[in-house]
Image (spheres, rainbow, N blue to C red):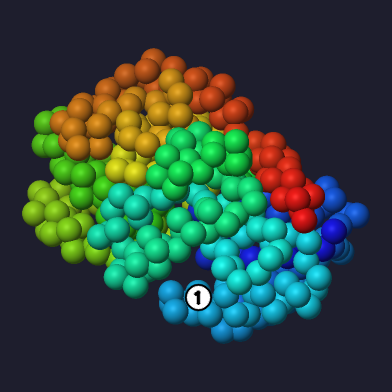
Amino acid sequence: MNIAVNTRLLLPNRLEGIGWFTYQTLKRICNNHPEHNFFFIFDRSYSDEFIFSKNITPIVLPPPTRHPILWYIWFNFMIPVALKKIKADVFLSPDGMLSLYTKVPQVPVIHDINFMYNPQQLPFFVRNFYCRYFPKFAKIADNIATVSEYSRKDISKIFNIKPEKITVCYNSTNELYTPIKDEIKLQTKQRITGGKEYFIFIGALNPRKNIPGLLKSYEIFRQNTKFDQKLVIVGAAMHLTDEINKTLSEMRFKDDVIFLGRLPVNELHLVLASAIALVYIPFFEGFGIPLVEAMSCDVPIISGNTTSLPEVVGDAALICSPTDHKLVAEYMTKISEDDKLRNSLINKGRIQREKFSWDISADNLWKCVETAANKN
């Protein structure tokens, strides 16, 4: 088969959630199926690190898709021409976007549909594009992949898609995420917080991640306890961050909140594995990769109870409402003072993390592609 793949989010040193899913699943699929030809379609110059095997042919198809208008042009005018030229049997799109003007079977990976519930959290043109076209993408797709059972049910319900058309391909972690030695933890803490213990959050700074709620919870924790752990926030600022800045400005302990921005995975691994706990209380999440990363590093978790999060953490976290700041603060206190609780959460995390495997997810995604191609 000739399999065309939208790889526009394979960006060197800039892999976010969808980019990591693309990287990890495609690497396995291409190596596991040398009998097929894969055409990776980039919208700008690419890095050789993403050409995983000899059966991959990279194609650069401008223009770079930095705006919804360019998304529309790229997928509806450029992609159909490319699919015809390479005689594609199927088009796989890990970011969920499809072409409305091709007869080639298509498989999108729709990670979540938060934009249908909270369109105001996205820039105007982005939300208009998502809300208008993703329902159409779901309708024309031959098969759909998603990253959790929660998202599978959500897509089925909101877009009126038969559940059997949607396959769950869980996220997992980079193999670097493992526990580290105490001496490395000490060195990392010395570098990041001057040696202080710290809680950590990982994720892009946008409204759905509930950073203001995290800051309020941390402020209550510090005001009501003797503990002096810092709060480390890892992730790039995206949009609508005014509320974060306002909340931070009103905090007594704002100087103990450390923003590190985006980190490369080798550094992020050390920073995460050295934390006393991950505090992850977003309003909406299709999966929540940092949860599995924390479990893989033997780091306890305080998790929100919304959307897919309970599915991912199982019983390996202290779970609460993302708006219950007092309870989040209480959980931070419990983890700070109770070694038995921390060890219990770590042990449960070791069991729970075994449910998430890139090998299994790649196999499930391949079945989606193969089934769609066979319909042609």
- Label 1, on which residue? 72
- Say whether residue 102 is left or right of residue 263: right
Depicted 18 relative to depicted 180: above or below? below
Residue lying at 41% horizontally and 50% vertically, measured from the top left = 113
Is residue 231 or residue 151 the one in the foreground?
151
Camera-side residue of 324 and 119: 119
User: Would you place residue 136 above or below residue 151 in this image?
Assistant: below
Say which amino acid is labelled 1: Tyr
Camera sees residue 276? no
Viewed as shown, does residue 187 lie left or right of 339? right
- The residue at the point 20 percent across, 57 percent down is 244
Q: Residue at x 46, y 44 (%)?
A: 160
Q: Compared with residue 348, is residue 275 higher up or lower down, i.e. above or below?
A: below
User: Residue 130, percent across and down?
Assistant: 41, 62
x then y, percent, for residue 234? 38, 54
Q: Position of residue 54 (x, y in %)?
A: 87, 64
| Image quadrant containing the C terminus | bottom right
Residue lying at the far right of the rendered structure: 35
- Against 371, is 49 above or below? below
The percent coordinates of residue 20 (x first, y second) are 58, 54
Q: Is residue 58 left or right of residue 175?
A: right
Left or right for 209, reference 274: left
Locate the N terminus and report the quarter of the image it occupies. bottom right
Quadrant in the picture for residue 4 = bottom right
Which type of secondary structure does the marked residue at label 1 adopt? helix
Q: Residue at x 49, y 80 (%)?
A: 70
